[in-house]
C-alpha cells in the first residue's frame, strides 16, 4: 500500500514541475512595461521619463536604457499602479532612443522606445548676403542668409523695414530654408532687412534676432539729355549747358564735349545733373555740344545740340481756336502766338493795347493770370477760361529775347476775338433751319390734304343732286296718262322714295 502511494507521488512531481514552469512563463509574458516621456528637449534642461508595468507582482525593478543597451538609471516601485520617474539633464549626448526594462518575480519585460531629439537654442544670429555687401543693379540677384553660431530645429522669420515678409505680402521675395531670395531685384527691394531664428519645444519658444542689413539697389542711368541757356551780364553774354539724366543712381560722372573735345567734367554725388559754363554770343554758332555720362557699368552719350542763339525776329502772328464742351457749347478760346524766329523768346499779351497782368512771370507750365486768363507753353498760349463780353476785343502778342530785358519787341497784328453769351455752332444753325423747313413742309402738306378732302365732298354732293333731277324727269309722263289714277299714285310714291334715297 505504501509503495502505491510513493508511486503516485512520483507521478505528480512532473505535473507540479510543469505547473510551476507554466506559472513562471505566464508571469513573464504578462509583464508589459510602458515608457512615457518627451521626444524633444532643450539643451541644458531636465526632462523626466516614466516607466510603469501594470498588473505586475511586487516589487518591480525598472531600468532606463539608452542606445546600445547603456544603463542610464534604475528605480524600484512597491506599488503596482505607481510609475517610476527617471530625471535626466539633457546634454548634447542625450539625443537617441530610450526604453525601460521591468523585472518582477523573476520575470522581465521591455517597454516601447522613445526617440529624444536635443534642441539647441539659436544664438548669435546674423544676416549674410551674396553678393557682399548687398549692393546690386536692378535686374540682378541677391540672396540673404540667416545664419547662427549655434542652433538646431530652427525656423526662420524675415523682416523688411520692420515688417514681416510673407509669400502673400511680398510675392517678389522667395523664402527658402534660411534664405531670402530676390531673383530679379527692383528699386522697391531697397531697404533694411533682418531675420529671427527660433525653435519651439512644446509650449516653450526660444528666439534670436539679427541686426538690420541695408540692401542697396542701383538703377541704371538713362541716356543723358542736354540743353543750354544764355544770360546777359552788362554788355557781355554768358552761356550755360545743362547735362542731366531722368533716372539712375548717383554718383555719376558727367562730361561736356564741344566739337568732340572735352571741355569739362563733373561728378554728381547727390543728383543726376551737372552744369557747365560756356562762351556764347547771340547770332554766332559756338559749336556742337554733347554730354557723356559714366558709371561703374555704363557709358552713354546724349544727342548733339548746336550752341547757337538766334535772336527774336521775323513775323509774329496770333492764331485763335475755339474749344467746345460735349453739349456743343463753347468752353474756352485758345490763342497761340507764333514767332517765326528766335531761340529764347519772351512772349507778352495785349488786349485792346493794354498789357495783360502778371507779365513778370515766366513759367513753362500753366499758371493763372486772372480768374479768367491762363498762360501755357512758356507764355506762347493764352487761354480764355471765361467767355463773356469782358473777354471780347483785339488781342496782340509781342516777343523779345528773354535774356535781354531792354531789347526791342516784335509785335503781331491785332486779332478780333468776339465772345458772346449765346453762341450757336454751325451744327446748331443747320439743325434749326432743318426744323423750320420740316415744319413748313408739314403745314403745306396738311393744307393740301384738307383742300383735296373738300373738293371730293363737293363732287359727291353734285353727283347726288344730278341723280335726283333725272328721277323727277322720268316720272312726269306716267302721271299724265288718262284714266289710270291708281298707277299715278303708285308712281308718285316711287318717286318720293327715290328722292329720299
Image: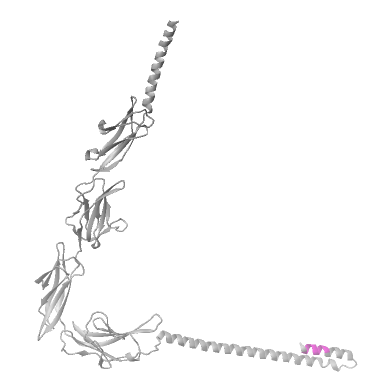
Q: Main secondary structure of the magenta part?
A: helix
Q: Nearer the viewer, residue 348 or 299?
A: 348
**Residue 94 rendering spot, x and y as whole percentages:** 24, 38
The correct choice, above or below, for 383 with respect to 143 in the image is below
Asked whether residue 342 is drawn in magenta, I would say no
The image quarter containing residue 27 is top left
The residue positioned 41% from the left and 15% from the top of the image is 15
Q: 452 left or right of 409?
A: right
The image quarter containing residue 3 is top left
**Residue 246 rendering spot, x and y as whole percentages:** 21, 70
**Residue 289 rendering spot, x and y as whole percentages:** 13, 74
In the rendered structure, which segment of residues is drawn in magenta? 493-499
Image quarter of the C terminus: bottom right
The residue positioned 26% from the left and 38% from the top of the image is 88
**Residue 186 rendering spot, x and y as whole percentages:** 24, 61
Image quarter of the N terminus: top left
| Any part of residue 298 in sight | yes
Asked whether residue 498 is drawn in magenta, I would say yes
Snapshot colouring? one colour
Q: Nearer the viewer, residue 425 or 41?
A: 41
| Any part of residue 341 in sight | no
Q: 68 left or right of 423?
A: left
The correct choice, above or below, for 484 with respect to 42 in the image is below
Q: 60 left or right of 429?
A: left
Amino acid at each position: 500500500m505504501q509503495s502505491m502511494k510513493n508511486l503516485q507521488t512520483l507521478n505528480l512531481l512532473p505535473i507540479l514541475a510543469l505547473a510551476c514552469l507554466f506559472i513562471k512563463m505566464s508571469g513573464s509574458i504578462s509583464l508589459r512595461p510602458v515608457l512615457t516621456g518627451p521626444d524633444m528637449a532643450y539643451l541644458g534642461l531636465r526632462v523626466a521619463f516614466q516607466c510603469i508595468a501594470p498588473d505586475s507582482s511586487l516589487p518591480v525593478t525598472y531600468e532606463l536604457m539608452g542606445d546600445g543597451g547603456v544603463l542610464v538609471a534604475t528605480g524600484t516601485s512597491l506599488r503596482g499602479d505607481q510609475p517610476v520617474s527617471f530625471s535626466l539633464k539633457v546634454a548634447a549626448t542625450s539625443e537617441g532612443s530610450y526604453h525601460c526594462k521591468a523585472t518582477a518575480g523573476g520575470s522581465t519585460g521591455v517597454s516601447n522606445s522613445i526617440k529624444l531629439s536635443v534642441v539647441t537654442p539659436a544664438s548669435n544670429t546674423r544676416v549674410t548676403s551674396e553678393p557682399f555687401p548687398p549692393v546690386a543693379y536692378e535686374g540682378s540677384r541677391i540672396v540673404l542668409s540667416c545664419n547662427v553660431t549655434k542652433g538646431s530645429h530652427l525656423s526662420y522669420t524675415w523682416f523688411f523695414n520692420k515688417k514681416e515678409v510673407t509669400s502673400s505680402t511680398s510675392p517678389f521675395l522667395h523664402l527658402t530654408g534660411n534664405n531670402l531670395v530676390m531673383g530679379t531685384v527692383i528699386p522697391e527691394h531697397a531697404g533694411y532687412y533682418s531675420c529671427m531664428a527660433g525653435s519651439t519645444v512644446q509650449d516653450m519658444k526660444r528666439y534670436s534676432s539679427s541686426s538690420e542689413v541695408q540692401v542697396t539697389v542701383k538703377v541704371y542711368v538713362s541716356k543723358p539729355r542736354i540743353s543750354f541757356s544764355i544770360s546777359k551780364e552788362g554788355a557781355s553774354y554768358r552761356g550755360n549747358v545743362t547735362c542731366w539724366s531722368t533716372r539712375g543712381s548717383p554718383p555719376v560722372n558727367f562730361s561736356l564735349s564741344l566739337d568732340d573735345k572735352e571741355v569739362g567734367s563733373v561728378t554728381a554725388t547727390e543728383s543726376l545733373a551737372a552744369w557747365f559754363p560756356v562762351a556764347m554770343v547771340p547770332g554766332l554758332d559756338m559749336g556742337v555740344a554733347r554730354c557723356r555720362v559714366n558709371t561703374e557699368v555704363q557709358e552713354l552719350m546724349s544727342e548733339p545740340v548746336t550752341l547757337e542763339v538766334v535772336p527774336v525776329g521775323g513775323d509774329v502772328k496770333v492764331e485763335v481756336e475755339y474749344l467746345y464742351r460735349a453739349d456743343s457749347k463753347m468752353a474756352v478760346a485758345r490763342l497761340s502766338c507764333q514767332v517765326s524766329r528766335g531761340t529764347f523768346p519772351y512772349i507778352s499779351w495785349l488786349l485792346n493795347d493794354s498789357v495783360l497782368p502778371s507779365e513778370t512771370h515766366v513759367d513753362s507750365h500753366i499758371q493763372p493770370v486772372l480768374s479768367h486768363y491762363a498762360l501755357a507753353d512758356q507764355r506762347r498760349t493764352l487761354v480764355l477760361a471765361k467767355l463773356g463780353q469782358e473777354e471780347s476785343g483785339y488781342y496782340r502778342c509781342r516777343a523779345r529775347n528773354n535774356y535781354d530785358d531792354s531789347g526791342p519787341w516784335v509785335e503781331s497784328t491785332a486779332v478780333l476775338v468776339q465772345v458772346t453769351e449765346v453762341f450757336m455752332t454751325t451744327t446748331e444753325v443747320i439743325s434749326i433751319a432743318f426744323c423750320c423747313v420740316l415744319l413748313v413742309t408739314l403745314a403745306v402738306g396738311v393744307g393740301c390734304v384738307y383742300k383735296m378732302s373738300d373738293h371730293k365732298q363737293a363732287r359727291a354732293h353734285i353727283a347726288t343732286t344730278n341723280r335726283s333731277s333725272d328721277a323727277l324727269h322720268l316720272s312726269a309722263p306716267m302721271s299724265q296718262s288718262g284714266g289710270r289714277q291708281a298707277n299715278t299714285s303708285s308712281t308718285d310714291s316711287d318717286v318720293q322714295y327715290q328722292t329720299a334715297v
